[in-house]
Image (tube, rainbow, N blue to C red):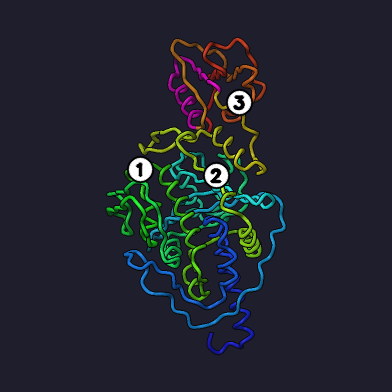
Amino acid sequence: MIGQPARQRTSLLARVDRIVSSILAIAFLVTGFQTGYRLTHGAGQAVKVIDRSPGTEHGPAGSVPVETVVPATEPLPMWRGTDRVNILVMGIDQRPGSALPGRADVIMIASVDPVEREVALLSIARDLWVEIPGHGENRINSAYFYGEFEGTEEAGPGLMKRTIEHNFGVAIDYYGTLNFECFKQIVDILGGITVDVPEAISDDRYPDDSYGYMRIYIPAGSQHMNGETALQYVRARHETSDFSRMRRQQQVILAMREKALRLDIIFSLRDLLPVFRDAFSTDLPAQDLLALANLATRIELEDVQLRVIDESLTIPYVAPDGAQVLLPRLQRIRGMIANLLEDSPVITESWDPELAEARILVRADASSPGLAIEIADYLRRRGYTARAESDGLQIESDGTFIASRREMAGTAALISALLRVGPEYVILDPNLKEGSDIVVTLGRSFVMPE
């Protein structure tokens, strides 16, 4: 900055301030929606972090030195839109020094209703076994890796957005990613956070930075955590489930919000800039981010809903490679999301709980018993209740037919689309075999969908 004219320095600082403010705005979306005004409006003022919890071993040492006073920013713009805004927020596990892309280790949808001034935060398990467009089935967090590795125009965030839309039927407007180093530094800048740990966390296989494992232990009770410990708390899972892990993530988000509201200080632009450089990305325009930050100041905690895709919405499953994963009950998940995000654009047809519980029988010729089992398993992985039958059956037709009770016609139509069976082969039959609502009879020319 030495040798630059004063006007040029001021202009540059203003642009940088806007960038940092934009970065902060996405953090507001996952930290309780009320810290935006203080931090953004004060981002240009020079003070030091003075809130430290004395006597704790976890608080970062010292305060942040500040040497230069930067003028305060201008007022934030107003959010003018009336439609709900859905933002995919991801925490990326990028190992230091690795040439390979990271994976999305934390996956959330932050949805803002600007009219009702309400927010919904939905946590998605990284081990959900879903269909990734163009890549077959895999864990949902692999979508980010595939997109980054292939170097396509949409990259990792774009493929993650398409995967969410394809499986859950909710349109994603924007994304924001933050790596774990940045998360740790944010917690440290806050002076650490206090979390009530409901039960002790012990993990002998917590991943370290050298592609090995380390042991971590976090005792139960009220714990003051620095950035490293907070990250361990939200990532540990060896002796717990993905569901408890997601609930811990939301717990830490609220703890960060509470700490930011309690702090009687603001942060220097010069302190924040190194934290976020190369650690954050989003496709939200800067002005829209600032407007969302402004909107965030008007949303109360009681108007923030937290949801997790939990045990009631998934089925434990062993993947082809032997890994323990979770099959999403897609119909139920889509219904939950439709209720949570009432006015959000839905990509697929509306959900009906009666259709989701349809009992499906898959039949194949006795000469191909594995085919019926394979298709029944294919449907179960997509949230349907399906079983196979082939013993003693002789199927003469080349074509595949789907017979359905009238009240299950909607589900039959969805299944026909999944199996690439033309609508002319879907019939209504009130006299189906007892115990079945839909019967899929696989013809001799049936080909498994890719």
Q: CA distance from mark 3 to mark 2?
A: 22 Å
- Choose mark 3 or mark 2, whichever is in front: 3
Q: Residue 346 location, x and y as percent?
A: 65, 40
Where residue 411 is drawn, which disc sits there?
A: 3
Q: For the residue labelled by badge 1, is the local secondary structure a helix, a strand or a loop?
A: loop
Residue at screen point 35% across, 43% down: 240
Q: CA distance from mark 3 to mark 1?
A: 35 Å
Residue at screen point 47% across, 35% down: 314
Range drawn in magenta: 358-381
Q: For the residue labelled by badge 3, is the local secondary structure a helix, a strand or a loop?
A: helix
Q: Residue 410 location, x and y as percent?
A: 64, 25
Where residue 163 is drawn, which disc sits there?
A: 2
- Quadrant where the N terminus is found in the figure: bottom right
Q: Is residue 376 magenta?
A: yes
Residue at screen point 64% across, 20% down: 407
- Choose mark 3 or mark 1, whichever is in front: 1
Q: Amino acid at mark 2?
A: Thr
- Choose mark 2 or mark 1, whichever is in front: 1
- In this figure, which residue is indicated by the disc labeled 1? 240
Q: Residue 316 location, x and y as percent?
A: 41, 33
